[in-house]
Image (spheres, helix red, strand yellow):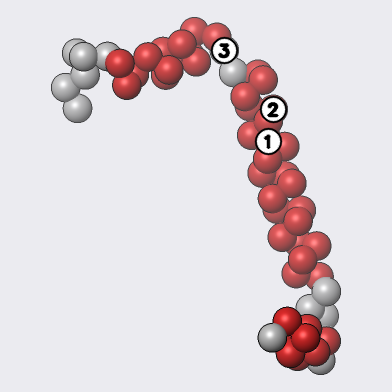
Amino acid sequence: MLKFIKHHMEGIEGIEIYPIISLLIFFIFFAILFLWVFTAKKPYLDEVSNMPLDSNNNE
């Protein structure tokens, strides 16, 4: 099955750019997420982490 798909994909011109683009998108997303996690303010993280335990939440 994989050989059929691989052989079929080899006939499409310019298809080799799609895996590169998807790798870049995921790498950039996780790099930004990593930076956000380490630069987030401690009071904000404490507030968000306590939200599920807050019994006064009427939403």
Label 1 CA crowd tier, 10 Å (few <14, some 14–19, many 20+): few
> Closer to the camera, 1 or 20?
1
Left or right relative to 52: residue 22: right
Q: CA distance from mark 3 to mark 1?
A: 16 Å
Q: Residue furthest front?
A: 1
* Residue with the mark numbered 2: 35
Residue at 43% over, 17% down? 49
Which residue type does callout 3 highlight? Lys
Residue at image position (21%, 14%) is: 55
State the mark number for residue 41: 3
Q: Toward the viewer: 33 or 6? A: 6
State yes or no: discs 3 and 2 in contact (Cβ < 8 Å): no
Mark 1 touches mark 2? (CB < 8 Å): yes
Q: Secondary structure at mark 3?
A: loop
Q: In which quadrant of the rendered view does residue 31 lie?
A: top right
User: Is 33 situated above or below 44?
Assistant: below
**Label 1 secondary element:** helix
Per the rendering, the mark at residue 32 is 1
Q: CA distance from mark 1 to mark 2?
A: 5 Å
